[in-house]
Image (tube, grey):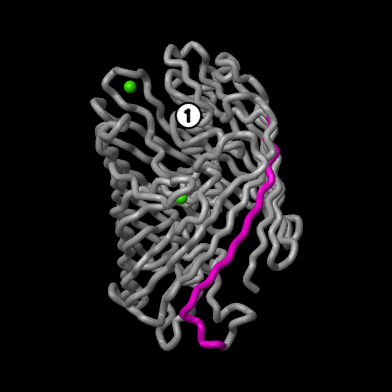
């Protein structure tokens, strides 16, 4: 109870400081952003046309940087050493490899407490055609994901051999909505990330990739002052040794807006998402509506940045009425020092279900998000959780970045499940403290084409897992190499 009160005090303090930050924010009209956009597409100069102002601002909050489209490992052939000047600027090509050694001692997600030391191997390839047969464009991405040296059975987190994870046909109308405001209509299989990646993500940390099949319309582009993306898709089920298939009894719809006109102060992302599931086997009929608003930005030269989000859900889940909520808030400060240290505080909440069989479904539906920013041990998902965090990051060298943090985790409802660890006490007698975690990571760009990441996390189990027989601490160390294959 005392901890709950502390959290409430912390949340109030967060909101109060937001209000004062907003009051201090410069009220100037938006100027174009000086920060370059992620996407290679957006880097493209606009010859013979008035260069459109770039309104895009990247959030500084932890782990929320979206993968670009095409992904970052993809290069335009005109910009590579080998193919420069060969007239191949209409071809995007990518080759990517990653190997990660993991030392996991007493991983609570496993049914037994033991040491496992797997190697995770991932190979990806990408080919994209644009600017040549416009308005027709096409993109294809291959992935091979596998794991060796583990004592546990294969699963779809680590394995998906020889799979086409994207195959998109596109109609691209460059100035359909105004100068440099394209309209893109896509059909096929696709992988993407939206907002802060907590609800929709490719899941870059994991060996396998989230993807969908269906249709997407993209109105505008990243540098425009507004953008609207509409989705009508079926999630793709990963099948280990066979070709993946669209989930037959699910549809996923969405409308995701971005308002960047005021991006010097705030970028606003309102969105509506609908997951429709039909009864099949043990799956019940579900209609889960999600309405959310995220706002992030930086406040002038104060060094303060913020990232705030509120989400509500309603609908039906089987015979139950669904009503769930979630919110996240992060505030960071960058100090004036050559290492650019940033100190941040985060607070996250997602509701849990109060009581099984009471006709109400209260557990937040996490959809298709990226769980990694919640916990380095992959223990926490965006449901039934209260999680405050403190983080520090700095850059001691041009080629080295360090970040570390401490996180605490409580169940939002002590009668609901801790899903990643598969623990639940419907009586609520086992407490609500899941545990706390320290993590540290060093990222090195060793050579121009070779990245090395070393990370460590320690998890101290709290009263909830202890009372249910899983009170072991967890040590998790990893070393990850990823060479870029195209010069
Ligand atoms: Ca497959
Ligand atoms: Ca219930």
- The residue positioned 41% from the left and 61% from the top of the image is 262
442 up-or-down from 449: above or below: above
- Of residues 375 and 280, the one drawn nearer to the viewer in this rendering: 280
In front of the other: 365 or 191: 191
Which quarter shows the C terminus? bottom right
Residue visible at 31% across and 56% down in the picture? 214
| Residue 302, quarter of picture | bottom right
Taking the image as shown, residue 407 lies to the left or right of residue 209, namely: right
Instruction: Name the residue furthest front.
Output: 241
Residue 151 occupies which quadrant of the picture? top right
Horizontal side, residue 23 vs residue 466: left or right: left
The answer to whether residue 394 of the structure is visible from this angle is: no
Q: Quadrant of residue 49?
A: bottom left
Q: Characterize the magenta stretch by its predominant secondary structure.
A: strand
Residue 63 lies left or right of residue 324; in this view the side is right
Q: Position of residue 311 (x, y in %)?
A: 37, 40
Residue 258 is situated, as x and y percent measured from the top left of the image, at 37, 58
Is residue 462 visible from the viewing direction of this image?
yes
- Say which residue appears at 51% left-offset and 87% top-offset: 87
């Amino acid at each position: 109870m005392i901890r709950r009160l502390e959290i409430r005090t912390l949340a109030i303090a967060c909101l109060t400081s937001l209000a004062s930050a907003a009051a201090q924010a410069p009220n100037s009209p938006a100027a174009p952003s000086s920060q370059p956009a992620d996407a290679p597409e957006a880097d493209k100069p606009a010859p013979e046309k008035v260069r459109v102002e770039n309104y895009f601002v990247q959030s500084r909050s932890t782990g929320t940087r979206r993968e670009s489209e095409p992904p970052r490992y993809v290069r335009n052939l005109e910009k590579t050493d080998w193919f420069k000047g060969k007239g191949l600027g209409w071809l995007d090509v990518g080759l990517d490899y990653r190997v990660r050694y993991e030392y996991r001692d007493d991983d609570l997600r496993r049914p037994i407490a033991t040491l496992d030391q797997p190697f995770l191997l991932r190979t990806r390839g990408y080919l994209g055609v644009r600017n040549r047969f416009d308005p027709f464009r096409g993109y294809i991405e291959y992935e091979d994901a596998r794991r060796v040296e583990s004592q546990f059975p294969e699963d779809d987190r680590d394995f998906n051999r020889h799979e086409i994870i994207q195959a998109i046909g596109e109609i691209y109308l460059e100035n359909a909505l105004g100068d440099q405001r394209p309209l893109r209509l896509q059909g096929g299989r696709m992988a993407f990330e939206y907002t802060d990646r907590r609800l929709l993500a490719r899941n870059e940390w994991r060996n396998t990739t989230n993807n969908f099949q269906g249709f997407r319309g993209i109105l505008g582009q990243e540098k425009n002052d507004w953008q609207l993306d509409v989705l009508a898709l079926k999630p793709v089920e990963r099948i280990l040794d066979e070709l993946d298939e669209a989930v037959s009894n699910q549809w996923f719809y969405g409308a995701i807006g971005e308002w960047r006109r005021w991006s010097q102060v705030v970028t606003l992302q309102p969105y509506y998402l609908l997951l429709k599931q039909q009864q099949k086997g043990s799956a019940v009929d579900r209609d889960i509506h999600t309405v959310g608003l995220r706002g992030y930005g930086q406040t002038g030269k104060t060094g303060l940045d913020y990232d705030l989000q509120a989400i509500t859900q309603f609908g039906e889940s089987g015979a139950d009425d669904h009503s769930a909520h979630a919110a996240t808030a992060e505030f960071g400060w960058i100090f004036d020092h050559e290492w650019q240290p940033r100190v941040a505080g985060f607070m996250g909440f997602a509701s849990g279900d109060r009581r099984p069989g009471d006709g109400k479904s209260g557990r937040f539906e996490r959809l298709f998000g990226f769980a990694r920013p919640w916990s380095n041990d992959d223990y926490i998902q965006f449901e039934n959780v209260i999680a405050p965090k403190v983080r520090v990051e700095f850059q001691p060298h041009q080629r080295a970045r360090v970040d570390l943090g401490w996180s605490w985790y409580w169940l939002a409802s002590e009668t609901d499940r801790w899903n990643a660890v598969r623990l639940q006490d419907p009586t609520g007698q086992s407490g609500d403290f899941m545990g706390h975690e320290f993590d540290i990571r060093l990222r090195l760009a060793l050579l121009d084409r070779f990245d090395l990441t070393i990370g460590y996390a320690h998890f101290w189990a709290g009263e909830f897992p202890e009372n249910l027989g899983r009170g072991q601490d967890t040590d998790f160390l990893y070393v990850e190499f990823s060479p870029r294959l195209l010069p």
